[in-house]
Image (cartoon, coloured by chain):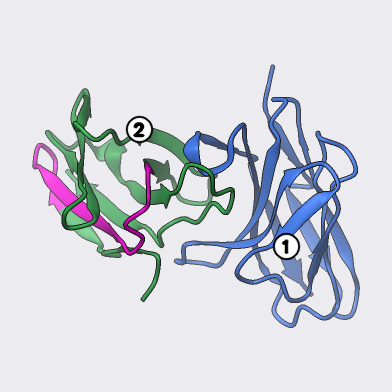
Amino acid sequence: DGGITQSPKYLFRKEGQNVTLSCEQNLNHDAMYWYRQDPGQGLRLIYYSQIVNDFQKGDIAEGYSVSREKKESFPLTVTSAQKNPTAFYLCASSSQGGSTEAFFGQGTRLTVV
Amino acid sequence: RKEVEQDPGPFNVPEGATVAFNCTYSNSASQSFFWYRQDCRKEPKLLMSVYSSGNEDGRFTAQLNRASQYISLLIRDSKLSDSATYLCVVNKNNDYKLSFGAGTTVTVRA
Protein backbone atom coordinates (compact mmCIF):
# COMPACT_ATOMS: atom_id res chain seq x y z
CA ASP A 1 0.00 0.00 0.00
CA GLY A 2 1.41 3.34 -1.02
CA GLY A 3 0.94 6.17 1.37
CA ILE A 4 2.31 8.60 3.90
CA THR A 5 2.76 7.62 7.53
CA GLN A 6 3.12 9.87 10.53
CA SER A 7 4.10 8.75 13.99
CA PRO A 8 3.27 8.90 16.76
CA LYS A 9 -0.42 9.69 16.57
CA TYR A 10 -0.38 11.34 20.00
CA LEU A 11 2.63 12.91 21.69
CA PHE A 12 3.02 14.59 25.03
CA ARG A 13 5.94 16.87 25.72
CA LYS A 14 7.16 18.58 28.82
CA GLU A 15 7.96 22.24 28.57
CA GLY A 16 11.56 22.84 27.53
CA GLN A 17 11.92 19.54 25.68
CA ASN A 18 12.59 19.01 22.01
CA VAL A 19 10.48 16.39 20.25
CA THR A 20 10.71 14.90 16.77
CA LEU A 21 7.71 13.95 14.66
CA SER A 22 8.21 11.29 12.03
CA CYS A 23 6.90 11.41 8.45
CA GLU A 24 7.61 8.66 5.91
CA GLN A 25 6.21 8.26 2.40
CA ASN A 26 6.54 5.45 -0.15
CA LEU A 27 4.87 7.33 -3.00
CA ASN A 28 8.19 8.32 -4.57
CA HIS A 29 7.20 11.98 -4.25
CA ASP A 30 9.82 14.69 -4.47
CA ALA A 31 7.97 17.32 -2.44
CA MET A 32 7.14 17.03 1.25
CA TYR A 33 5.48 19.47 3.62
CA TRP A 34 4.78 20.10 7.30
CA TYR A 35 1.71 22.00 8.46
CA ARG A 36 0.38 23.05 11.82
CA GLN A 37 -3.34 23.27 12.54
CA ASP A 38 -4.82 24.84 15.67
CA PRO A 39 -8.42 24.17 16.74
CA GLY A 40 -10.89 25.80 14.36
CA GLN A 41 -8.07 27.16 12.21
CA GLY A 42 -6.66 26.42 8.78
CA LEU A 43 -3.37 24.77 7.86
CA ARG A 44 -0.25 26.89 8.28
CA LEU A 45 2.90 25.90 6.44
CA ILE A 46 5.95 25.28 8.64
CA TYR A 47 8.57 23.90 6.23
CA TYR A 48 8.65 22.29 2.83
CA SER A 49 11.16 20.39 0.76
CA GLN A 50 11.32 20.09 -3.02
CA ILE A 51 14.10 17.54 -3.11
CA VAL A 52 16.52 15.59 -0.93
CA ASN A 53 18.96 17.73 1.08
CA ASP A 54 16.98 20.89 0.41
CA PHE A 55 14.19 22.55 2.37
CA GLN A 56 12.59 25.97 2.67
CA LYS A 57 10.92 27.87 5.49
CA GLY A 58 7.19 28.25 5.31
CA ASP A 59 5.10 30.90 7.01
CA ILE A 60 5.68 29.85 10.63
CA ALA A 61 9.13 28.20 10.77
CA GLU A 62 10.33 29.77 14.03
CA GLY A 63 10.88 27.18 16.73
CA TYR A 64 10.92 24.26 14.29
CA SER A 65 13.62 22.42 12.36
CA VAL A 66 13.59 19.76 9.65
CA SER A 67 15.92 17.53 7.67
CA ARG A 68 15.59 15.75 4.35
CA GLU A 69 18.37 13.19 4.17
CA LYS A 70 16.27 10.64 2.31
CA LYS A 71 13.54 11.06 -0.27
CA GLU A 72 11.15 9.02 1.85
CA SER A 73 11.61 10.84 5.13
CA PHE A 74 11.00 14.39 6.36
CA PRO A 75 11.12 14.55 10.18
CA LEU A 76 10.06 17.67 12.06
CA THR A 77 11.64 18.71 15.35
CA VAL A 78 9.65 20.97 17.62
CA THR A 79 12.23 22.77 19.70
CA SER A 80 11.95 24.40 23.09
CA ALA A 81 12.03 27.74 21.27
CA GLN A 82 8.48 27.10 20.02
CA LYS A 83 6.46 28.82 22.71
CA ASN A 84 3.06 27.39 21.91
CA PRO A 85 3.63 23.94 20.40
CA THR A 86 0.31 22.30 21.30
CA ALA A 87 -1.36 21.65 17.94
CA PHE A 88 -2.25 19.10 15.28
CA TYR A 89 0.70 18.53 12.92
CA LEU A 90 0.15 17.27 9.39
CA CYS A 91 2.74 16.00 6.93
CA ALA A 92 2.03 15.90 3.20
CA SER A 93 3.74 14.95 -0.03
CA SER A 94 3.17 15.62 -3.70
CA SER A 95 4.85 14.58 -6.91
CA GLN A 96 5.17 18.04 -8.43
CA GLY A 97 4.56 20.59 -5.75
CA GLY A 98 1.57 22.85 -6.14
CA SER A 99 0.39 21.56 -9.49
CA THR A 100 -0.53 18.08 -8.30
CA GLU A 101 -2.56 16.46 -5.56
CA ALA A 102 -1.10 16.48 -2.07
CA PHE A 103 -1.44 13.38 0.07
CA PHE A 104 -1.54 13.69 3.84
CA GLY A 105 -0.57 11.53 6.75
CA GLN A 106 -3.06 11.04 9.55
CA GLY A 107 -1.42 13.66 11.71
CA THR A 108 0.25 13.90 15.10
CA ARG A 109 -1.45 15.60 18.04
CA LEU A 110 1.19 17.23 20.20
CA THR A 111 0.32 18.37 23.69
CA VAL A 112 2.61 20.20 26.08
CA VAL A 113 2.10 19.09 29.66
CA ARG B 1 -3.91 40.85 1.58
CA LYS B 2 -3.72 37.08 2.03
CA GLU B 3 -2.84 35.00 -1.03
CA VAL B 4 -5.95 32.88 -0.62
CA GLU B 5 -9.09 33.85 1.28
CA GLN B 6 -12.18 31.86 2.10
CA ASP B 7 -15.44 32.68 3.82
CA PRO B 8 -15.10 30.69 7.06
CA GLY B 9 -18.84 30.13 7.37
CA PRO B 10 -20.30 28.14 8.94
CA PHE B 11 -22.89 27.41 6.30
CA ASN B 12 -25.75 25.61 8.02
CA VAL B 13 -28.07 24.04 5.46
CA PRO B 14 -30.87 21.45 5.55
CA GLU B 15 -30.52 18.13 3.79
CA GLY B 16 -31.30 18.44 0.11
CA ALA B 17 -30.34 22.09 -0.11
CA THR B 18 -27.76 23.60 -2.41
CA VAL B 19 -24.81 25.40 -0.90
CA ALA B 20 -22.07 27.33 -2.67
CA PHE B 21 -19.01 29.24 -1.55
CA ASN B 22 -15.96 30.88 -3.02
CA CYS B 23 -12.23 31.12 -2.60
CA THR B 24 -10.54 34.30 -3.79
CA TYR B 25 -6.87 34.53 -4.72
CA SER B 26 -4.53 37.46 -5.19
CA ASN B 27 -1.91 36.14 -7.62
CA SER B 28 -3.14 36.46 -11.19
CA ALA B 29 -0.38 34.05 -12.32
CA SER B 30 -2.00 31.16 -10.43
CA GLN B 31 -2.54 28.11 -12.59
CA SER B 32 -3.46 25.19 -10.33
CA PHE B 33 -6.65 25.07 -8.31
CA PHE B 34 -7.98 22.39 -5.99
CA TRP B 35 -10.67 21.80 -3.43
CA TYR B 36 -9.90 19.56 -0.43
CA ARG B 37 -12.25 18.23 2.20
CA GLN B 38 -11.30 17.89 5.86
CA ASP B 39 -13.43 16.05 8.38
CA CYS B 40 -13.17 16.94 12.04
CA ARG B 41 -9.81 15.86 13.53
CA LYS B 42 -8.80 14.14 10.29
CA GLU B 43 -6.37 14.86 7.49
CA PRO B 44 -7.47 16.76 4.36
CA LYS B 45 -8.22 14.76 1.23
CA LEU B 46 -8.55 15.91 -2.34
CA LEU B 47 -12.16 16.51 -3.35
CA MET B 48 -11.58 17.74 -6.87
CA SER B 49 -9.28 19.71 -9.12
CA VAL B 50 -10.68 22.85 -10.73
CA TYR B 51 -10.25 23.22 -14.47
CA SER B 52 -10.61 26.35 -16.57
CA SER B 53 -13.76 25.04 -18.19
CA GLY B 54 -15.29 24.08 -14.88
CA ASN B 55 -15.90 20.51 -13.82
CA GLU B 56 -18.50 18.40 -12.14
CA ASP B 57 -18.27 15.27 -10.04
CA GLY B 58 -21.65 13.96 -9.05
CA ARG B 59 -23.29 16.53 -6.80
CA PHE B 60 -20.20 18.73 -6.71
CA THR B 61 -19.42 21.45 -9.24
CA ALA B 62 -16.25 23.51 -9.28
CA GLN B 63 -15.72 26.62 -11.34
CA LEU B 64 -12.90 29.05 -12.01
CA ASN B 65 -13.38 32.75 -12.66
CA ARG B 66 -10.03 34.14 -13.75
CA ALA B 67 -11.31 37.66 -14.38
CA SER B 68 -12.48 38.04 -10.78
CA GLN B 69 -9.82 35.69 -9.41
CA TYR B 70 -11.88 33.19 -7.51
CA ILE B 71 -12.86 29.55 -7.58
CA SER B 72 -16.18 28.24 -6.38
CA LEU B 73 -17.61 25.00 -5.09
CA LEU B 74 -21.29 24.14 -5.31
CA ILE B 75 -22.86 21.18 -3.56
CA ARG B 76 -26.28 20.08 -4.75
CA ASP B 77 -28.74 17.90 -2.85
CA SER B 78 -26.68 18.17 0.35
CA LYS B 79 -26.25 15.04 2.46
CA LEU B 80 -25.47 14.80 6.16
CA SER B 81 -22.14 13.28 5.14
CA ASP B 82 -21.18 16.50 3.32
CA SER B 83 -20.65 18.19 6.69
CA ALA B 84 -16.98 19.07 6.70
CA THR B 85 -14.51 21.88 6.19
CA TYR B 86 -13.64 22.62 2.57
CA LEU B 87 -10.16 23.96 1.87
CA CYS B 88 -8.98 25.56 -1.34
CA VAL B 89 -5.49 25.46 -2.79
CA VAL B 90 -4.35 27.96 -5.40
CA ASN B 91 -0.86 27.74 -6.84
CA LYS B 92 1.48 28.47 -9.70
CA ASN B 93 2.53 25.28 -11.48
CA ASN B 94 6.24 25.72 -10.77
CA ASP B 95 5.77 26.83 -7.17
CA TYR B 96 6.42 24.20 -4.55
CA LYS B 97 5.18 26.34 -1.67
CA LEU B 98 1.78 24.78 -1.13
CA SER B 99 -0.57 27.04 0.82
CA PHE B 100 -4.14 26.29 1.84
CA GLY B 101 -7.03 28.62 2.45
CA ALA B 102 -8.34 28.72 6.02
CA GLY B 103 -11.38 26.66 5.04
CA THR B 104 -15.15 26.98 4.81
CA THR B 105 -17.20 24.95 7.27
CA VAL B 106 -20.42 23.37 6.02
CA THR B 107 -22.92 21.74 8.36
CA VAL B 108 -25.83 19.84 6.85
CA ARG B 109 -28.72 19.25 9.26
CA ALA B 110 -31.48 16.65 9.10
Q: Residue placed at 33% from the left, 64% from the top?
A: B26
Where in the figure is residue A74, as x and y percent of width and height? 80, 46
Where in the figure is residue B107, as x and y percent of width and height? 25, 52
- Image height check: is A74 above or below A38? above
Per the image, the residue denoted by label 1 is A110
State yes or no: residue B30 in magenta: yes
Q: CA distance from mark 1 to mark 2?
A: 30 Å
- Viewed as shown, does residue A76 lie left or right of A90? right
State yes or no: residue A111 in magenta: no
Q: Residue placed at 79% from the left, 58% from the top?
A: A11
Dot 2 lies on which element? strand
Magenta extent: B13-32
Q: Residues within 10 Å of mark 2 (few under 14, many from 20)?
A: many
- Residue toward you, A40 or B67: B67
Q: Residue placed at 35% from the left, 34% from the top?
A: B49
Which chain is home to disc 2? B
Residue B28: which quarter of the image? Answer: bottom left
- Image height check: is A109 above or below B43? below
- Extreme residue toward the left, this view: B17
- Looking at the rendered structure, the kind of residue marked 1 is Leu
In which quadrant is the N terminus of chain B drawn? bottom left
Q: Which chain is green?
A: B
Give chain A's shade. Answer: blue
- Residue toward you, A78 or B50: B50
- Image height check: is A23 above or below A77? above
- Image height check: is B34 above or below A1? below
Q: Residues within 10 Å of mark 1 (few under 14, many from 20)?
A: many
Per the image, the residue denoted by label 2 is B48
